[in-house]
Image: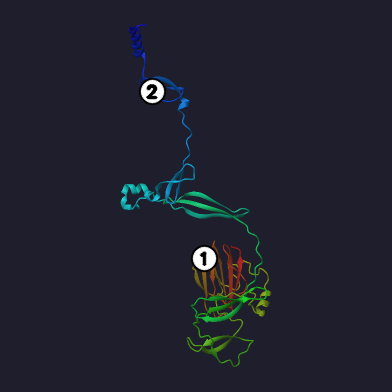
Amino acid sequence: MTDEEYNEIKDRLIDDSQGVSELPVATSLDGVTSLPALKDNSVYSVPLSLLKGSDGREVSIRVSNGYIQWSLNDSTWTNVVSLSELIGPAFTYSDFTEEQLEGITGTTGHTPVLSVGSVVSGDTPAANFVSNATDEDGNPIYTLDLTLAKGDKGDTGSTPIFSIGTVTTLGSTAPATVNLTYTGDDTEGNPLYTMDLSIPKGADGAGAGNVLVNTTGLLSTKKYVFQPNADGSAEGTFIEVSEDLVEDSNYVHTDNNYTTTEKDKLAGIASGANNYVLPDTVAYKTTKSVETATSKELQPNVFYVWGEMASLTITLATSTDDAPEYMFKFSSGDTATTLSLPVSKIMNDVTIEANKTYEVSIMDGIAAIGEVSDE
């Protein structure tokens, strides 16, 4: 081969060849088995396995003696930096802007509101919080349900023994007090207590208390009433009174306060003796008078007739007859009539009732009242 032919071939090879720097650049090693390399002006193919380095050594880091330290074999430690160099000056609020402080400080939280719900006994103690709602300020409301374990039965306790100590009388407006003092135990271990009492006295009465009376001649078998010598006086005399005396005109006798004579007299009255309708005229009365007034003075031997009356007040006219009789009839409506009579006794025990008709006869201060038909 001539020099001319050699140079021509060389030039063509150089024109068609690429340098390492002109090769495409790979973005990963996936699928790559070797790399081109220059050595002594020659191009070599280098396997990737030759590019793997030796396994590295694990570095340990610790904080000790005021330093951050490192070591390869945990036996020799080398200081990296002093901890004091890592601590800067303390911050104050003036080091921050208002916006920075808002970022550091959180919003004010809500205060939970707790209440105890059910409390039951059980074998295992437990507590359960139940969220119910929120109050008007947004605070959460919780109910705490408790299960309390039942304890063992305790020993029988001692019986306290009390005794009265001092008793002091206080003013009528002072409150009563009790002072309990422990004084020791008896031979059986029961605690002993003494109670000192302070008790207010009763308020002073407005009356005179006792009365001043000459008791000569007073008998235990008699009844007496006190008559003062003057208004507001505690001095006076006792006046004997009869068992038959009735001071209240509205007083009604019962079986407990009739005399024996009166009971015998009443026993002779036949049952339902007053349950009849009086005729318009009878031998012992002369006329019949129809009335509507709520108050009336009755004349003797006149039969007065009222219709339905809410109330009726009767008075008696004076008579010269030996035994004047005053008679009248009335009816109750839906409400029982309120009847007022000027008598000392009512012979039969009658209660005025609604929607009923009654006849009344009064003689010698005694009234007899009977229910009759409304005719």
Left or right: 17 as drawn, with respect to 50: left
Q: Where's the N terminus, which quadrant? A: top left
* Residue 310's disc number: 1
Q: Regarding mark 2 in the picture, which secondary structure is present there?
A: loop
* Residue 27's disc number: none
The structure residue drawn at horizontal position 67% and vertical position 79%, both measured from the top left corner, is 260
Front residue of this view, candidates 71 and 231: 71
Left or right: 55 as drawn, with respect to 190: left
The structure residue drawn at horizontal position 42% and vertical position 20%, both measured from the top left corner, is 44
Where, by quadrant of the figure, is residue 323 drawn? bottom right
Vertical position of residue 22 compared to residue 202: above or below: above
Q: Amino acid at mark 1?
A: Ala
**Residue 240 rendering spot, x and y as whole percentages:** 59, 87
Distance, label 1 to label 2, CA atoms, is 128 Å
Q: Regarding mark 1 in the picture, which secondary structure is present there?
A: loop
Circle 2 residue? 25
Front residue of this view, candidates 320 and 80: 80
Density class for disc 2 (Cα within 10 Å; few <14, some 14-19, many ≥20) is few
Q: Earlier in the sequence, mark 1 or mark 2?
A: 2
Vertical position of residue 243 compared to residue 6: above or below: below
Q: Is residue 32 visible?
A: no
